[in-house]
Image (cartoon, helix red, strand yellow):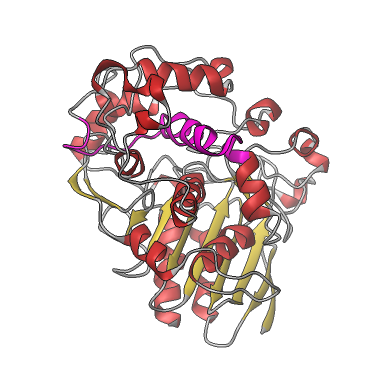
Amino acid sequence: MSVMSVRGGAHGTVAAGYEPVRDAFVRNFAERGERGAAVTVYRDGRRVVDLWGGTKDVDGDLAAGDAPWERGTAQIVRSATKGVAAAVPLLLHQRGELDLDAPVGSYWPEFKARGKERVLVRHVLAHRAGVPALDRPLTPAEALDPDLGAAVVAAQAPFWEPGKDHGYHAQTYSWLVGELVRRVTGRPVGEWIADEIARPYGLDLWVGLPRAEAEAGRAGRLGRIEAPAGPGGLRMRPKRNVAEAYADAASLTRRAFGAIDPSPDENDAAYRAAALPASNGVATADALARFYAGLIGEVEGGGARLFTPATVASARAEASAGPDRVLVVNTRFGLGHMLHGAASPLLGPGSFGHPGRGGALGFADPESGVAFGYVTNGMNKGVTADPRAQALVRALRESL
């Protein structure tokens, strides 16, 4: 491993041959408005890239006394949380506790209401359940109540015939997956992830950050969310039809992303302490990469693989593809994970994982044995293909 400490406050280590990732990481600060970020890559269970830099505070100016980003700095990863949450029903299926082809209503009877009796568990995971939005959005305070969120989703009429089409369940995925896991296991999904995944594998990863950690503020390890610094963060230009969908308050796109309205303060301790498996997971880059490394193989420092080969095959088997009724582009999903494609480029055709709106990205590529985690506090407006994350993925592809 080579040690790196470069101008601009970037630090870390890279194994020989992975220097392109280091160079791309440094360029993100110089050219793409990066504020504070980290990227980690495992290959065959061994860490080969471990880089961090910038500031975990809002100003992005270390000279002004902002706290520097450290190796253990954790960050809200928005929808990259979905990739972690999706592993839970897949692991329950692997253990024989959950039938992917069973109706959701067989575990959660209230969900059968208003034409949803034929929604299968696999439809929920593949964004085919038909309930990406709510007739009445939840307030930020209401959204933090898992019982209320589940009840509202259960009472919601579908926006299309369940199973027939797919559309990204940007916010409602929280209550769909969270309540399904609670009905099957008797435990909240965040608690299940902590007990069965995070603690056994030594991951600094939470869906529902412990309150003391959430309230630590500047003295703690969390990066604060803010827009990227400078013009580099403005280079994402959505296609016209996508921009029009986001601009139309009546569109399913706006309604799906606005299922919580107004948007919550993601730097608020109460928000971070809640468990919203669609959007508010907190993780270090190393935890995100190590999680995906553990899905596909054994990892250095202990930890047997989480997914059997059959479960890996299920995770990356295409379950939805084509026009997405919410994202208004062609998307590809397995059972809970996004798959490599034009809307969300990963390492290659066999990769599976999940981006987070604004920049974060985690994925595994079983063919190469690679697992990748990138977190940032400079949140772009894009949903699936942030230019900073994509620069790192291209550099990783070059390194391999």
Instruction: Name the residue rendered at 45%, 36% in the picture.
Output: 177
Asked if residue 266 is positioned above or below residue 310 in the image, the reply reads: above
**Res 32 visible:** no
Q: Is residue 16 magenta?
A: no
127, above or below 118, in the image: below
Question: Quadrant where the N terminus lies?
Answer: bottom right
- Looking at this rendering, what residue extends furthest in the top direction? 136
Q: Is residue 71 something one can see in this rendering?
A: yes
Residue in front for this viewpoint, 240 or 138: 138
Q: Magenta residues? A: 162-190
x and y percent of residue 362 in the render? 49, 58
Q: Identify the residue at horizontal 69%, vertical 72% (top origin).
A: 302
In the displayed structure, 99 sits above or below 202; it is above
Quick check: is 170 in the magenta stretch? yes
Residue 328's spot in the image, x, y percent? 22, 38
**Where residue 30 sits: x, y (%)?**
54, 61
Closer-to-camera residue (77/147): 147
Picture quadrant of residue 289: bottom right
- 241 shown above or below 109: below
Q: Position of residue 139 (x, y in %)?
A: 51, 15
Number of marks: 0
Question: Which residue is pictured at 65% across the width and 62% down the height?
Answer: 52
Side (left or right) of 254 relative to 216: left
